[in-house]
Amino acid sequence: MTKRTSLLLLLTPLLIIACTVIDRQIPVVSHFQANAYLGTWYEIARLDHGFERGLTHVQASYREQGDALLVLNQGYDPQTQKWQSANGIAYFIDGRDKGLLRVSFFRPFYGAYQIHALLPSQPQNGQYQNAIIMGPNNSYLWLLSRQRQVSDDVKQTFIEQAAVLGVNPQQLIWVAQTPALTPAE
């Protein structure tokens, strides 16, 4: 093995860890239960960014594989009338009981996935119902739900939390989820 190959093998784990970006760490859920997070979530609201721009009926499905969570994000493009999808993988950063993960859709680059709040805070019927997620900074914010529609109370809590997190609530995009569309399997 050459010196260069040895150096690359030694540095690779450090480079991968270093690629987890958290520009702004926020308070995250403690006593998190990964099993209650698995399954399908509907995107109720988000901030605008290129990889979801114009998409409706966005949903994310999470499943466990070893120490990782696999994620399939899907959204409908009404312009092309086609579904777009992206596969990702997430790992817990600070233990499985904290809502702080590093996620990648473009390995080896990882970004933070910070579960800021669960509404209500305890699982119902074995599953969390609504989640407020922030990415590596306040340019990425989502409201996810197990249902395609949420109550006005959940929306108001999300708007208030967005402001607390430094996000202008006027910038939120409320994602169309009705009529119900389901991606082809």
Image (cartoon, rainbow, N blue to C red):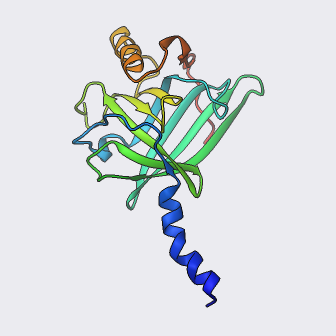
Q: Which residue is depicted at the point 27% across and 44% down?
A: 33
Q: Position of residue 89 (x, y in %)?
A: 50, 52
Q: Position of residue 125 (x, y in %)?
A: 25, 33
Q: Position of residue 100 (x, y in %)?
A: 36, 44
Kindly give the residue lying farthest to the right in the view shown.
80
Q: Which residue is depicted at the point 29% across and 51% down?
A: 96
Q: Which residue is depicted at the point 31% across and 29% down?
A: 118
Q: Residue 98 occupies which quadrant of the picture? A: top left
Above or below, 159 against 112 in this view is above
**185 or 21: nearer the viewer:** 21
**Quadrant position of the N terminus in the picture:** bottom right
Please state the total of marks drawn on the protein image: 0
Q: Which residue is depicted at the point 68% across and 34% down?
A: 83
Kindly give the residue lying farthest to the bottom in the view shown.
1
Above or below, 177 against 62 in this view is above
**Quadrant position of the C terminus in the picture:** top right
Q: Position of residue 66 (x, y in %)?
A: 39, 62
**9 or 37: nearer the viewer:** 9
- Left or right: 115, with 180 as reference point: left
**157 or 69: nearer the viewer:** 157
Q: Residue 158 occupies which quadrant of the picture? A: top left
